Image (cartoon, coloured by chain):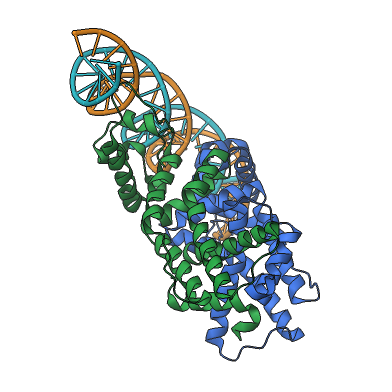
Chain colours: A blue, B green, C cyan, D orange
Amino acid sequence: MSSAASSPARRTGRPRSAEADRAILDATRAALVELGWGKLTLGDVAARAGVAKTTLYRRWAGKSELVVDAVADLFDEHLELPDRGSLHADIEGVVLQFAALLERPETKTALMAVVAESTRDGALRDRIRSAIVDRQKSLVLLGRERAQRRGELPREDDATTASRTADLIFDVIAGAVVHRTLVSAEPVDEEWARGFATLLIGGLGATA
Amino acid sequence: MSSAASSPARRTGRPRSAEADRAILDATRAALVELGWGKLTLGDVAARAGVAKTTLYRRWAGKSELVVDAVADLFDEHLELPDRGSLHADIEGVVLQFAALLERPETKTALMAVVAESTRDGALRDRIRSAIVDRQKSLVLLGRERAQRRGELPREDDATTASRTADLIFDVIAGAVVHRTLVSAEPVDEEWARGFATLLIGGLGATA
DNA sequence: GCAGTTACGCTACGGCTCGTAGCGTAAGAG
DNA sequence: CTCTTACGCTACGAGCCGTAGCGTAACTGC
């Protein structure tokens, strides 16, 4: 999760302070809330964390990488999806789950910014994918599996098309929530989630 | 469109050079392609445009405002939707239309960045809405109207719920395309557009 | 204990971008 | 021909970036 390379056997020398890691990530989130992405500076984060600026640069290559890790923690803690009994209710569940994370000021201001940076930085894009996107996606896959067990969705025969439609559905769900929240700047409340789930399950005909 | 205030009667003094406006916006798009949002500097844009930096600052308050206007021009020129005869085909049309704009390097790197900034700047959000989002939305509304004339969609009785579902559909379409392009970083080709249109019209059941 | 290794805090620095001020000049309006 | 506004140019203080150098702290293995 952090930038620390996967060095399972670091035998010698002074170990890196895990406390400093926590302090830096906490400070990053706090600075995001107060200043937003644009005015956030690494010097300020270091000062808030009570850490030298050099320490911060020894662990993260830049602003983007740091912020990805900082918000990834939130996705770790707040993503779970209880079984609500039906496909419709489960979709409402994922939607409200995503929305709750996106409405935090930390994530709201940070996510689009790092995605924007990632259009020119493949490594950053991979980091975002593994730290954030894939964790959202797992919720969608979980919901589909449940629906298949309930008989609400047919079991896929071909693995390729199954994966392709799963990608499609994920882009539709996550995209709609993100667009509603950040572009339209309207709240994703229960009413909206209900309407969206109805649309997704039944299609345009079902909205009438 | 530009930052020039709506002063219909500017009677006296030297008029602002429209040519400079064009040069600046062209230079901004070129710089976006070469450098991306993050490394784009206003001084560089001014130099490319053959214009003094002060001239640029007299017209735009900052990077975000300038970039919004620069990419808004592209949305002006490239958004239209020929009647393809059916709702399904028209949806594919909007999707490919959006995607073609989003796949340009200028817009790809710029749109998410300004949206990110807009989360802390209401004026910027309004500017994005009127310059970009509303123009996309008009395509969706046009497609719905056509479908209603063809009898593929029912005419709405209540204006309030009609507007609400239109907003929903717009967020779903635009959000899915944006997410597919920028987050999943996969191409929006005709195959994807076909699958998406099928999903949107028929719902999850129709994908089987 | 003691040497070896790595992380930390601190200071300082060149380089870049920002956004503005001041000045003389260019271009239309009346 | 004068008034008014825009332009190009230069210069500037301010802030942030990312790194280097140094002495100190923490932990490991002999």
Say which residue appears at 65% left-offset and 75% top-offset. Answer: A205
Find residue A24 and report its horizontal and vertical position in percent. Answer: 61, 45
Is residue A38 visible in the rendered image? The answer is yes
Find residue B36 and report its horizontal and vertical position in percent. Answer: 38, 51
Q: Nearer the viewer, residue B76 or A17?
A: B76
> Taking C21 as reference, is A110 left or right?
right
In the picture, the quarter occupied by the C terminus of chain A is bottom right
Could you tell me how many numbered marks the image carries? 0
Find residue A43 and report its horizontal and vertical position in percent. Answer: 52, 37
Q: Residue furthest bottom?
A: A157
In the picture, the quarter occupied by the N terminus of chain A is bottom right
Q: Which of A163 and A173 is in front in this view?
A: A173
Find residue A138 and report its horizontal and vertical position in percent. Answer: 64, 71
Say which residue appears at 31% left-offset and 52% top-offset. Answer: B34
Q: In this view, does B59 lie above or below C6?
A: above
The image quarter containing residue B55 is top left
Q: Which of B79 and B120 is in front in this view?
A: B79
Say which residue appears at 70% left-offset and 56% top-offset. Answer: A100
Q: Which residue lies furthest to the right in this view?
A: A85
The image quarter containing residue A83 is bottom right
Q: In this view, does A99 lie above or below A158?
A: above
Is residue A141 visible in the rendered image? The answer is no
Q: Is residue B162 above or below residue C16?
A: below
Say which residue appears at 51% left-offset and 50% top-offset. Answer: A113
